[in-house]
Image: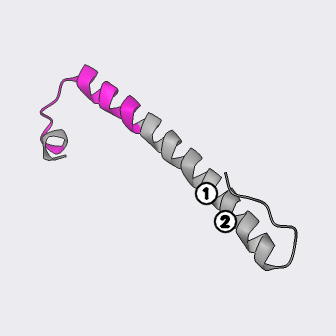
Amino acid sequence: MAELEKGGYPLNKLISLFEEGSRLARHCQSRLDSTERRLAELVDTADGTAERPLD
């Protein structure tokens, strides 16, 4: 991180790092969305609706 702040990377490396960060953000968002759906199913079960097995 300190290297980025000092400007120690060429533009093509910065673009590559940005692309990797974007991919990681999409992956994390997908995992978070999936987990939220699973938790919603558990909450529904606690409220007395039909149980749904977890994958």
- Is residue 13 toward the left or the right of residue 49 in the image? left
Q: Residues within 10 Å of mark 1 (few under 14, many from 20)?
A: few
Disc assigned to residue 39: 2
Q: Which residues are magenta?
A: 5-21
Amino acid on which disc 1 is placed: Thr
Name which residue lies at 43% across and 40% down.
24
In this view of the protein, which residue sits in the foreground, 46 or 9? 46
x%, y% of residue 48?
Answer: 86, 78
- Is residue 16 toward the left or the right of residue 9 in the image? right
Is residue 41 in the magenta section? no
In this view of the protein, which residue sits in the foreground, 39 or 20? 39
Element assignment for label 1: helix
Q: Residue furthest right?
A: 49
Name which residue lies at 67% across and 65% down.
39
Q: Between marks 1 and 2, how big is the CA–CA gap?
A: 6 Å
x%, y% of residue 49?
Answer: 87, 72
x%, y% of residue 26?
Answer: 52, 40
Q: Residues within 10 Å of mark 2 (few under 14, many from 20)?
A: few
- Is residue 33 toward the left or the right of residue 43 in the image? left
**Placement of 40 over or under 34, stated as above or below:** below
Q: Do the CB atoms of the residues marked 1 and 2 lie less than 8 Å apart?
A: yes
The residue at which mark 1 appears reads as 35
x%, y% of residue 33?
Answer: 63, 52
Name which residue lies at 49% across and 47% down.
28
Amino acid on which disc 2 is placed: Leu
Which image quadrant for residue 9? top left
Element assignment for label 2: helix
Name which residue lies at 69% across and 57% down.
54
In this view of the protein, which residue sits in the foreground, 9 or 51? 51
